Image (cartoon, grey):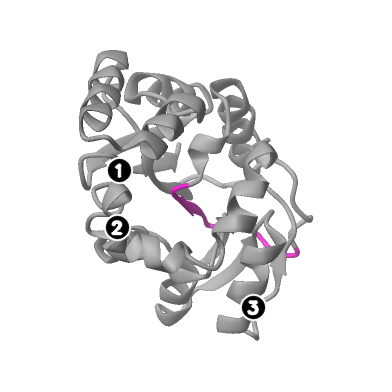
């Protein structure tokens, strides 16, 4: 359930915030408008928020600033430590999109940024089904992640980054489980969510899925 990528995040914890700030040229376009992307997710959220992939706590900080209650889940020990240094009063659980502690109160919003692609499409299906059991009518899932309009768009992006010599990014695009809008649309609808997609940069789309 995405845990095959934990070693990557263990190594990335110390430099993650440098990367998302745009200082890594290879990943600059992936994280273009990063602050606005986080704000879009935070502004679309309400109530008790379950956040998957807390990372260093960037989105979490915005959610708390907006007065929301947050339950954080993060599989990387190094990332949890970074986030706990920043947000010492917040409990961050060891877990992932499918395996997390039983919640003590109902959740109104499930959020994640730059992480849902760690699941295969089959795992995404199972995860969305699980969330449909947690959420009540009009509650929502709000994800921001790299998604492609179709398989051709995915291939074109791989060719584009290869031409630029961005071989680490190319490897990411070829080995992680990036999916397409039609696939996600079908999965959300299958589990009784009405979903909209808004493109935020050349890679990232905001997905707002409302339980119906």
Which residue is depicted at the point 49% across and 29% down? 192
Q: Secondary structure at mark 1?
A: strand
Q: Are marks 3 and 2 in contact (CB under 8 Å)?
A: no
Q: Residue 15, how many percent across, how many down?
A: 48, 65
Residue 94: quarter of image = bottom right
Q: Which residue is mark 3?
A: 84
Q: Secondary structure at mark 3?
A: helix
Tag of residue 62: none
Q: Secondary structure at mark 2?
A: helix
Q: Residue 166, how many percent across, how many down?
A: 31, 38
Q: CA distance from mark 2 to mark 1?
A: 8 Å
- Furthest toward the front, the residue is 165
Which residue is depicted at the point 64% across and 85% down? 88
- Badge 3 or badge 2: first in the primary sequence: 2
The one of 3 and 71 positioned closer to us in this rendering: 3
Q: Which residue is mark 1?
A: 204
Residue 101: quarter of image = bottom right
Say whether residue 107 is visible: no
Where is 112 relative to 129, above or below?
Answer: below
Q: Which residues are magenta?
A: 104-114
Q: Is residue 77 left or right of residue 48?
A: right
Q: Are marks 2 and 1 in contact (CB under 8 Å)?
A: yes
Q: CA distance from mark 3 to mark 1?
A: 27 Å
């Amino acid at each position: 359930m995405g845990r095959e990528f934990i070693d990557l995040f263990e190594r990335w914890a110390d430099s993650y915030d440098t990367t998302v700030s745009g200082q890594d040229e290879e990943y600059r376009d992936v994280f273009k408008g990063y602050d606005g992307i986080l704000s879009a997710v935070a502004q679309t959220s309400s109530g008790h928020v379950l956040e998957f992939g807390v990372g260093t706590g960037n989105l979490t900080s915005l959610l708390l600033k907006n007065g929301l209650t947050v339950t954080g889940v993060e599989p990387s020990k190094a990332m949890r430590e970074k986030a706990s240094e920043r947000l010492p009063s917040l409990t961050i659980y060891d877990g992932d999109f499918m395996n997390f502690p039983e919640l003590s109160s109902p959740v109104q919003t499930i959020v994640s940024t730059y992480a849902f692609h760690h699941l295969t499409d089959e795992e995404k299906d199972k995860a969305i089904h699980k969330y449909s059991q947690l959420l009540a009518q009009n509650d929502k899932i709000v994800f921001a992640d790299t998604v492609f309009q179709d398989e051709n768009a995915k291939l074109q992006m791989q060719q584009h980054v290869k031409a630029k010599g961005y071989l680490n990014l190319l490897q990411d695009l070829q080995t992680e489980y990036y999916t397409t809008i039609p696939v996600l649309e079908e999965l959300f609808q299958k589990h009784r969510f009405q979903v909209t997609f808004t493109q935020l940069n050349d890679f990232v789309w905001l997905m707002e899925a409302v339980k119906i």
